[in-house]
Image: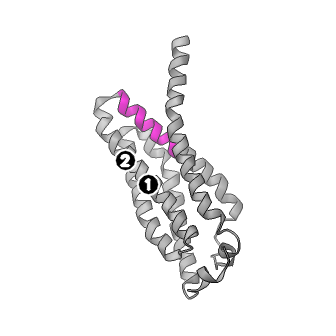
């Protein structure tokens, strides 16, 4: 029983780096987001189907947790079976790349206050999430499934980003006109 407990404890400790990376990316992204949620974001024209601001935090909290568990499952599968090693490495590389793109979107859309730049980042982000889900599923099917809500939410965010860009594209001075 003690050996099983130690094994479980060791497995949970191996989850911590992925949790730290996921929520570290969330924290970094929120640094860019927080300074623009005031007058700039509120002044943008948005479609009626824009979720309330209070929904984004809880949704992203769950999604970042699922991302961490997905990467952890891939890592465990890669260590457990030599046949999964190559798939696991590819999935984890893709996982790190999508995490960087995730932060980059916040930096561009909110940090630079660029609606069109956000579109330029969210398209490859969505593709990288899809790629990560496929690669993760090869290593461990559940790991790929855990990324599907993130893929769906990012698809929704892309549609929202596009619609906000459409509604505001004739307002070129908006970014500079409002204080930080």
Relative depth, front residue between 112 and 77? 112
Residue furthest top as drawn: 1
Q: CA distance from mark 2 to mark 1?
A: 9 Å
Q: Quadrant of the N terminus?
A: top right
* Image point (55%, 17%), residue name: 5
Where is residue 111 shown, x and y percent of the image? 57, 68
Magenta part mainly helix, strand or loop?
A: helix
Classify mark 2: helix, strand or loop: helix
* Left or right: 68 as drawn, with respect to 175: left
Residue on which the image places disc 1 = 98
Q: Residues within 10 Å of mark 1 (few under 14, many from 20)?
A: many
* Image point (59%, 79%), residue name: 175
Where is residue 42 shown, x and y percent of the image? 69, 74
Classify mark 1: helix, strand or loop: helix
Vertical position of residue 53 compared to residue 134: above or below: below
Residue furthest bottom as drawn: 170
Vertical position of residue 97 compared to residue 75: above or below: below
Where is residue 81 shown, x and y percent of the image? 33, 29
* Left or right: 180 as drawn, with respect to 17: right
Number of marks: 2
Q: Which residues are magenta?
A: 67-80
Say which mark, if any, is on residue 37: none
Residue on which the image places disc 2 = 93
Camera sees residue 1: no
* Image point (60%, 81%), residue name: 176
Choose the circle earlier in sequence order: 2 or 1.
Answer: 2
Q: Residues within 10 Å of mark 2 (few under 14, many from 20)?
A: some
Camera sees residue 128: yes
């Amino acid at each position: 029983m003690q050996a099983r407990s130690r094994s479980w404890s060791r497995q949970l400790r191996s989850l911590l780096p992925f949790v730290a990376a996921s929520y570290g990316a969330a924290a970094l992204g929120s640094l860019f987001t927080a300074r623009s949620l005031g007058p700039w974001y509120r002044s943008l024209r948005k479609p009626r189907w824009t979720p309330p601001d209070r929904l984004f935090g809880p949704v992203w909290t769950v999604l970042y947790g699922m991302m961490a568990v997905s990467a952890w499952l891939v890592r465990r599968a890669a260590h457990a079976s030599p046949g999964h090693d190559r798939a696991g490495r590819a999935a984890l590389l893709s996982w790190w790349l999508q995490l960087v793109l995730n932060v980059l979107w916040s930096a561009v859309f909110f940090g630079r206050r660029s609606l069109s730049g956000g579109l330029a980042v969210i398209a490859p982000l969505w593709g990288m999430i899809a790629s990560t889900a496929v690669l993760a599923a090869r290593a461990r099917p559940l790991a790929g499934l855990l990324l599907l809500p993130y893929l769906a939410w990012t698809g929704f965010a892309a549609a929202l980003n596009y619609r906000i860009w459409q509604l505001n594209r004739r307002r070129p001075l908006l970014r500079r006109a409002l204080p930080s």
